Image (tube, grey):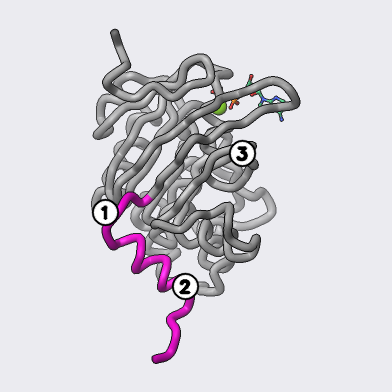
Amino acid sequence: MQPKPAELDARATAIGAGPLLQVSGLGKRYGALPVFSGVSLQIAAGEFVALRGESGVGKSTLLNCIAGLDRADEGSVSLAGRPVHQLPEPEQARLRRELLGFVFQAFHVLPHLSVADNIGLPLMLLGRPDPARVQQMLDDVGMAALGGRMPSQLSGGQLQRVAIARALVHRPPLILADEPTGNLDRDTADKVFALMLQRARERGLAFVLVTHDAALAARCDRSLRMEAGRLLQPETEGV
Ligand SMILES: Nc1ncnc2c1ncn2[C@@H]1O[C@H](COP(=O)(O)OP(=O)(O)O)[C@@H](O)[C@H]1O
Ligand SMILES: [Mg+2]
């Protein structure tokens, strides 16, 4: 039988049994200074998990280590049952591109690309450009006529909607969102969050949402807290 392309394998595995994300004993130091250690967590397909904790506690570092934007010093990360760090670098990159979407606090929309090209970037990187899908995403985030604009011509709320569309366009089973509404006013934050929730639910996507906002966290299925370099599991929280 013909072997399937790796990306189809990854998607098939993601839909199968077992956690979508499994983090085990993860530790990160900057020099001698530990940021966190012994961090373990599981995320199931379609699950929404809030990640909370004081500023500087290591939430962004943890998300970056999961996404491969930063490198952990110990422990392991498995995506769809595959141990990411044990794979050769190109395969790691492909697996992450296929399975993850990332929404940053500061949007990180690329200034020299049009709105449509920003949203289409993950599809380009996967070698699957799809202008119709990009237009569908523009419609979905209420920016149907704005694909040709440059990012400098958008408001903060619109930029974050572009970032959300970009994280969702390739339908990755897991979205990592690092304070995605932190730079937005309350009203816009609520709208952007509601949109993200709705789109993710419709498509059965899981996400990890870093937020300081108790009201947003309460709308997730589960809430985790980082404190003093540890991830507190729900049973040890709030005592
Ligand atoms: N590149 C770096 N070099 C040294 N220390 C860093 C670096 N990046 C982050 N840190 C430190 O790691 C800790 C966790 O930071 P961060 O993950 O950004 O926290 P949070 O997202 O929870 O606010 C902080 O004490 C921060 O100063
Ligand atoms: Mg942070």
For the point 37% across and 63% down, the residue is 136
> Please, is residue 76 above or below residue 81 in the view?
above
Q: Residue furthest top?
A: 239
Tag 1: Cα neighbours inside 10 Å, few (<14), some, or many (≥20)? some
The residue wearing badge 2 is 130
Disc 2 or disc 1, which is closer to the eye? 1
Instruction: Point out residue 24 in the picture as x, y percentages from the top left corner.
Output: 46, 39
Instruction: Point out residue 177 in the picture as x, y percentages from the top left corner.
Output: 45, 39
Q: Secondary structure at mark 3?
A: loop
For the point 35% across and 36% down, the residue is 193
Tag 2: Cα neighbours inside 10 Å, few (<14), some, or many (≥20)? few
Q: Amino acid at mark 2?
A: Asp
Indicate the quadrant containing the C terminus: top left, top right, bottom left or bottom right.
top left
Tag 3: Cα neighbours inside 10 Å, few (<14), some, or many (≥20)? many
CB of mark 1 near ligand 2 (< 8 Å): no
N-terminal label among 3 and 1: 3
Indicate the quadrant containing the N terminus: top left, top right, bottom left or bottom right.
bottom left
Decide whether residue 14 is among the magenta residues: yes
Residue 24 at least partly seen: yes
The residue wearing badge 3 is 72
N-terminal label among 2 and 1: 2
Q: Secondary structure at mark 1?
A: loop
Of 140 and 152, nearer the camera is 140
Instruction: Point out residue 121 in the picture as x, y percentages from the top left corner.
Output: 56, 61
Q: CA distance from mark 3 to mark 2?
A: 34 Å
Quarter location, residue 236: top left
The residue wearing badge 1 is 204
Q: Amino acid at mark 3?
A: Ala
Instruction: Point out residue 231 in the picture as x, y percentages from the top left corner.
Output: 44, 24
Residue stretch in magenta: 1-20
